[in-house]
Image (cartoon, helix red, strand yellow):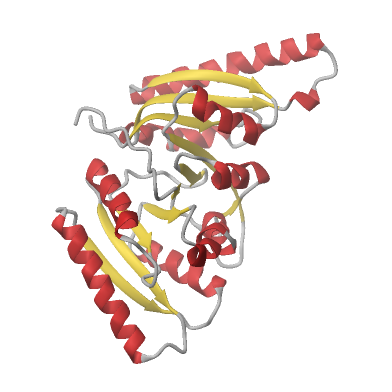
Amino acid sequence: MNVPFQTTLVTIDLDDKYLTRYDRTYPNLKYLTNNVILLYVLESSIFNKDDERNELIAQKNTQLNELASGIQKSTGLNVKAVIQTGKPAEEILKATTSYNINLIGMSTHTHSDENHTLKNALGSTTNHVVRESKVPVFTFNSNVVLNKIIKILLPLDMTMETRQKVTNAIQLAKSLHATIAIVSVLQPGKSKDIKDQLKKQLMQVKEFIEQAEIPCTTELIESEKIGVKSITNSILNFGDEEHADLIMVMTQQESRLAEFFVGSAAQTILRLSRIPVLSIIPKNLGFVIVGA
């Protein structure tokens, strides 16, 4: 089976009281990868004595191996359990090199919010990994059933997007046999000429994607208010309406876009999205297509 990522590093919190929720997400890994490194990081600062350290590591190792075995049985994937000690974000990033990782998978916790009842609670570890990772990072809400990815939502700022970024989405869509839904948000106060130009550019991108034999739709949304919150809410609401299975955002952009995709708007998408988010580096999506 062709998959977009050869080896995926999945981080796990064995102390998470909602650990059983992962049963609804792991079976879908088979659409993304062939091999899984299941990583649990014990913070070294919690140890007082060596015997306590060894006893806890042995306990967690048994627990992690049982989980890995269950995932392997349910998915047919090759799953390896790994325990490291240190600072979680640093160990996760080190492991991407040690195990030749192409994708990092991280679950987010949830709590209520006035607009989105399944708001993600992103910690410092997730933010650190998304910001520093050299490979794509797949973040998903552990309270939501993870579907097979058949529709990718690609938010674009048409004043700066390049052919290379769209090509990244095409690569992923081809591997997953998915469609692409492009959305761009026009803030209040823009002239009719700018609106017409954006529509024209959207159609050009749509034609480019369809030339690659990927079904594609485009939508230009006019937000009611100016600002990051209005932009992100427009994107997320559109994603819900379109029943998108994945939102793709860029973690490194040209200077004018860096603030949008790396700063507060990207964090808002990660925090509020009920849809899994793939954060990628435009220059290197990290694909290793198997069996092509």
Q: Does residue 161 sit above or below 121 in this rendering?
A: below
Left or right of 52: which side holds 4?
left
Q: Which residue, as the protein is rendered here, is positioned at the far right?
A: 48
Report which quarter residue 112 is drawn in: bottom right
Horizontal and vertical percent for residue 292?
Answer: 19, 31
Q: In this orientation, which residue lies closer to the viewer: 159 or 67? A: 159
Quarter of the figure that contains the N terminus:
top left
Q: Is residue 98 visible?
A: yes
Could you tell me which residue is drawn at 25 percent across and 77 percent down?
Answer: 200
Report which quarter residue 39 is drawn in: top right
Horizontal and vertical percent for residue 190?
Answer: 42, 87
Left or right of 64: which side holds 183?
left
Horizontal and vertical percent for residue 264?
Answer: 59, 63
Could you tell me which residue is drawn at 22 percent across and 69 percent down?
Answer: 204
Q: In this orientation, which residue lies closer to the viewer: 79 or 195? A: 195
Q: In this orientation, which residue lies closer to the viewer: 64 or 230? A: 230
Could you tell me which residue is drawn at 32 percent across and 46 percent down?
Answer: 149
Could you tell me which residue is drawn at 48 percent across and 42 percent down?
Answer: 137
Horizontal and vertical percent for residue 217?
Answer: 24, 65
Q: Is residue 116 visible?
A: no
Q: How many marks?
A: 0
Report which quarter residue 63 is drawn in: top right
